[in-house]
Image (spheres, helix red, strand yellow):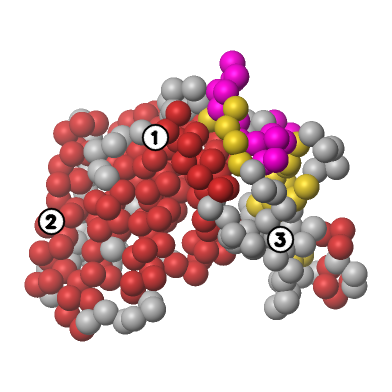
Amino acid sequence: MYSATRRMLTLAALPASTVSSPAAARTVRPSWNLLLARSVSTSQVRLDVTPNVTDDKKPQLKKFWRAVTLRQDEDGFQVLLDGRVVKTPQGTALSIPKSQPMLAHLVSAEWESQQKLLRAFSLPLTSLLVRAKDDFSDPDVRKESIDKLMKFLQTDATCFHEEFPEELVRLQQAHWDPLLGWARTHFSVAIHTTNSLLGTRQPDHTSATLRTHIEQYSPLQLAAFEKAVLTSKSFLIGLALTERVMTAQQAADAARVEVQAQIDRWGEVEDAHDVEREDIQRVLAASALVVE
């Protein structure tokens, strides 16, 4: 999970136009990765969506600005690098709602904290804002994404309960049972659980009710929900986080129930379990922050 999440957020290394050979060109594939590059215009800095080049020696983009500032106008807050507005791949200003000044300062801090080389995993809030601004303002993209997210409900990890070992049962009861109880009560739906390898299917009424609810999300809420679901591999954990019923820490603990049960029984693998834990917490914290 850790490596997959990192791949989703890794900076694209090189535009497709710079691939020099047919063999290299065949390794180029579209991605959502962000390339932070200077715009042709001197009045802005633009975030561009580019192909990802599968090359062992990827050039990394160096920090090219000195000062990060915030500007507020009628559209909200904007981040400026050396006085130039950061823009999304579609050319719109990367703006933060007026109602979220704390988020604006946190996004500014993301850019301020960059060192000599840019690290995409250290720009999680910026990534969510770009996803919301460019993609989820498009009804077709929203529908396609919601279609994919609804599939997680049918395979939600929190609905698969084991009867042993004791460590796992204890963690399921502590982290999953309250979540399931909240979802059933809050949305007045039935949510089935199972201990069978064959799984279970949630009722059509449940799916329809929950889909109707998330279809009302703002672009930024939907971006946060999507990231939380993909990270936790759970529709219900993502829902509870977006609804602010769970904190980022609680969501991370719920997402790692099975892994934690193994750690409790066999011990933690250094530089594996601990790194995964921190990465999940980082991503879920970003989702929680944008819906505050």
Against 28, is 40 above or below?
above
Residue 43: name its quadrant: top right
The residue mark sitting in front, 1 or 3, is 3
Does the magenta-highlighted stretch encompass residue 82? yes
Please state the horizontal and vertical placement of residue 220, each as a whole percent of the image: 49, 34
Q: Which residue is mark 2?
A: 174
Q: Which residue is mark 3?
A: 61
Against 2, is 113 above or below?
above
The amino acid sitting under disc 3 is Leu
Q: Residue furthest front?
A: 66
Kind of element beneath mark 3: loop
Q: Earlier in the sequence, mark 2 or mark 1?
A: 2
Q: Earlier in the sequence, mark 1 or mark 3?
A: 3
Q: Which residue is mark 1?
A: 291
The residue mark sitting in front, 2 or 3, is 3
Rate crowding at label 3 as few (under 14), some (14 to 19) or many (20 or more) other CA atoms within 10 Å.
Answer: some
The amino acid sitting under disc 2 is Ala
Real-space Cα distance between discs 2 and 1?
25 Å
Please state the extent of the stretch shown in magenta in the rendering: 72-92
